[in-house]
Structures are given as C-alpha cells and as structure tokens.
Amino acid sequence: MPETTPDSGFAGLGLDERLLRTVRELGYEDPTGIQSATIPLLLAGRDVVGLAQTGTGKTAAFALPILQRLNPKAKTPQALVLAPTRELALQVCEAFESYAAHLGGVHVLPVYGGQGYGVQLSALARGVQVVVGTPGRIIDHLDRGTLDLDKLRFVVLDEADEMLNMGFAEDVESILSRTPAGRQVALFSATMPPQIRKLAKGYLDDPAEVVVAGKTRTAPNVTHRYLLLGHQQKVEALTRLLEIENFEAMIVFVRTKNETETLAEKLRARGFSAAAISGDIVQAQRERTIGQLRDGKLDILVATDVAARGLDVDRVSHVVNFDIPTDVESYVHRVGRTGRAGRSGDAISLVTPRERRLLVAIERSTGQRLSQVQMPSAEDVNATRLTRFDDEITAALASDRLDFFRDVISHYVTEFDVPEVDVAAALALQLQGAEPLLLEPDAAVEPERSGSSRGRNDLVPYRLAVGKQDRVLPRQIVGALANEGGLRREDFGRITIRPTFSLVELPAQIPAQTWAALRSVRIAGRPIDIELDKGPKGSGKPFGKRKGGPGARADGVKHDKRRKS
C-alpha cells in the first residue's frame, strides 16, 4: 500500500503552511474524523459541539484552528481551555506548544490547583495568549482579579461531561458568564446528558454538532498488557522486562526525539543491543538501522511515532510503550508494528497513575482490554539469568573444542590439587566480570493497586492543614488530591471542613509514589501537610471511624512511617 503524503488530508482543511509544516514533522498522516469535521468549522468562526471519545484527536481539532487565528502580539489571554484534571490540562498545554513550534511569540500557561500562585501570576504578568486550566483554579484567579478575560476570543470545554461529573458545573457556568459576548465556544464531550445539552443551549450560539462514532481496532493476535508504576521506575521496569520476556526484536516508543537516544544509551550501558531513530535522522541512517533490526544485528529500536511510520519488520515480537501515547490512533499504530505476517505479538505499556485516564480511553475506543501485570521482581530476573546460565553451559558441553579445555583443566586440578567444581566456579567468576550474576532481593515495597479494587470499607480519615479560614471547598480538595495523586472519585469518602483543618476519607493503603505526590499538594496556596488523622488530641478517637472496617486503624502511627515498614 503506498504511503499517504503526511499533509494531504490536512492541507484541504484550510490550515496555513506553518501549521502544516508542524503536522508533517509530528508525523500526522490523515486527519481523524473529529479533526476533519471540526477544524473547518472553527476556522469559519462557528461554535461547535463535538461528541467523541478521549483519544480521537480532539486536542488538535481545536488547538490548530485557534493557533491559526491567534494574534501573537496581544499579551492578554485570547483562548481559554477548561479541562477536568491537572494531567489533561498539562497534556493540552504540551500539545499547544508543539503545534505552535513555527508560529513564534505564542505563550501557553497551565493553571491548576496544587501549583503555587507565584508561577502563574508571573506568567500572566509577562503575557500569555492561551490559558489551559481546571475550573477551580480559574475561578480562584477570576475572584482575585488576576486573570483578565476581557479580550477572550475562544473558549473550549474539553471533556465537558467529566467536568460536570466531578462537580464543576457551577464553576463552568460561572466562568462562561464572565467571558465577553461574541467569543467562540467549542464544547467536547464523550456523552450528551441533559446537563451538557442545557449548557450548550445556554452558552453556545447556534452550534454545529459533530458526532464521531465507531471503534478503532487493534490486531486480534496481539496481547496487550500494562504496568502501573512511577515515572522514575520506568527504566528499571523496562530493563527487567527485557531480561525475562522471550522476545525476538522489540520497538520501544517514547514521545520525543531527545528521549530516543537517551533511553537507547541507558539500555546499551546495561548490555542490550539498542539503537535510536527519530524524525531528525537522515533517510539513509534510518534504512540502515531498520535493516540491522530486520537482519538480527540489532534487537531493540527506540523510536518516536514519526520515525516508526511505515516500519514493517516481521521479527518484531514486542512493542513497549515506554511513554503511553496521548491518543488512540497512535496506540493502534504503535502496536501494529508487531503481530505481522500472521505472527503473534505483545504490546506492553508503562503507565503512571496520572495516565490512567489514557489507558481507559484506549480500552474504550479499541474495545481491547489491557491486562495489568506487576513489574518483574528480582527473583524473576534471577531465575531467568540462572536458566540462561544453565543453557550456556549445556551449549558449551556440546562443543567439539571441549577436549582441549578438558586437558587444560585436568592439568590445573592435578598440579594445584583443587577440586574441579572450584575451578569451574573460578572460571565462571572470571567470565562474569564486575557485574554480579544475580540481583539483590527487592526491598519490601507496597505494590501498586488498581483504584477499582479499593472498597469503600478500606477508607480511613486523613487530616489536611487547610480549613474554613482558607475558604477551602470540598471540590477543591477532591480536585487537588485527584489531580496530584492520581486518585479516583471512588477513592474519596466523607469530607469535613473545620475552621483550621479538614478531614477527608481516603484508602487506608496508599502506594508510595502516590503518597509522595500527595505530600507536595497545595490548596488555596497553602501546603496541606496530609497525615493520617488520630482524632482529637488526647482522645485517641479517629474521626468518622467505620464500624467493623479498617477505619479502626487509629494506632498513633503516622502514615508515612507505616509506609516505610
């Protein structure tokens, strides 16, 4: 099948050459359904209601036309994008910045709870054209008078149904009511409940409705798995997977071209045959590297989406998403590099807690369930290494050169009166070098647990150092803790706000990396200093103890100390 010219579809949508150049460099081939339908409408100034799942390319659908119509010389916000979560706001910001690479003078600011106001105020003072934020923090800035929307031309509600589900309906309407008349509004939602229709009717002007249906399927002969882990654990997890997975050749996908060589170098330092390709390398080098992968001279290719476009190597048995893609089409394209020519294939994604929503979007859009697996333990790796060591000895015993070395060893045994097993051990030690054969046992760490497995009976009270005097609201607590710690709505129980502190019920067992993230959260500009609640001073009684449940754990031991045990 001939390769599609990268900008052939986008060029017909009315985008200017600077944005088309960006599209080409990012490796986009044909626009998705939501992009084809939405971009011309937004360029023409129409309000739009888009019904599409996460991962269908919505961000480019609204970011590209907004960027084309921005005035980079104006220093007050011209576009406001509302997103339900911190992680989505950051992803939208990154997308805007990527798409604006050849525009010059465009400044994008993420605004969300949990981040200090100072950084946001400084950026607003310098001048920004695009603000992407969560409703709670946007409201805070509007109330403080630090965000000027007088010159606003574009408003986007991204994942509007999710915002309303999280209790932001009042905030969203309040923000929309403070935007100037005549601004253009685009509303995107996966579903169209009555609340969304009411919102669209009240704040959009004769909107065009765009509906994208259907699923993007992956090959049926590919097994899909994922690991839930912290970002700092990814290299170690990948290294262990490379040791225990029975793979022939592997492609490891990262998001940026700079990360390709960085990761490839780390893998080479660990003894793996790895090379990097990105959109920057010349065609001759790309073909040479892929040829080495095809011929078995190279085992691991670290690549970006752009560089892997059109790559077809039958011996690729595994694809690893070192960085999970932010859209479903990229996921389908990546995993399509394995399971070729009727063979079976494996796709493994390394997912951080904040990226769970991307995982859900992939499952929903592809209809493909991804199975969670744990990071291979030191014992798993050691068992594999010992099996490999046994196989190497067995292969060596079959060599026709063994007789010569048998005589050499016999001479040493006779001459120095050393047992043969000790000589064999000494030779193995010499060949092993400085790198130990076996890993040290893993430290006892609490495993990551899927949010869906937590029951309501596992909730216990935690104390936060913010309260009524800080004008904190329950929605701010939920938003900040969910965004920073990757918590889900079902992880929250009762919330009580007292004059100087607040109490919130959360899971009794919180993974180490989630706890570390929660410890750094700020609400209303103040650190929350979260800790397990021990009840009123001297009483020993916990707040909100649940009858017969683990909430009875008010043993006077602070949560961070229990986590280390």
Image (spheres, rainbow, N blue to C red):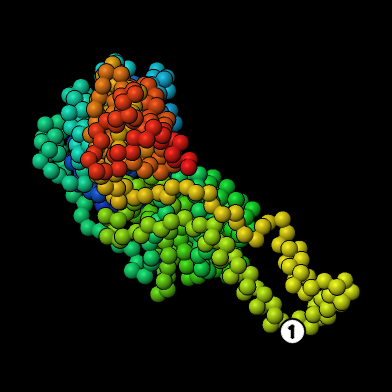
Question: Residue 17: x, y in percent?
Answer: 39, 41
Count of numbered badges drawn on the protein: 1
Q: Amino acid at mark 1?
A: Asp
Give the vertical position of 443 relative to 130 (above or below). below
Q: Residue tagged by mark 1? A: 400
Toward the viewer: 32 or 507? 507
Residue 157 in view here: no
Assess disc 1: are there few (<14), some (14-19) or many (≥20) residues with their C-alpha within 10 Å of its C-alpha: few
Q: What kind of element bears circle 1?
A: loop
Q: Which one is in front, 85 or 217? A: 85
Q: Nearer the viewer, residue 59 or 279?
A: 59
235 to the left or right of 57 = right
* Residue 337 in view of the camera: yes
| Rendered view: 439 above or below 541 | below
Residue 58 screen position, x and y as percent: 29, 45
- Residue 546 position by quadrant: top left
Please provide percent x and percent y for residue 179.
21, 24
Task: Give the x, y percent position of residue 309.
Answer: 44, 58
Give the residue drawn at x 76%, y 69%.
422
Residue at x 28%, y 16% (from the top left corner) = 469
Is 218 or 490 nearer to us in this picture? 490
Residue drawn 37% across and 26% down? 528
Q: What residue lies at 20% left-to-right and 39% top-to-bottom?
A: 165
Left or right of residue 170: residue 562: right
Q: Is residue 190 left or right of residue 22?
A: left
| Res 536 quadrant in image | top left
Q: Residue furthest front?
A: 539
Task: Determine which quarter of the picture holds residue 559.
Answer: top left
**Quarter of the image that includes the N terminus:** bottom left
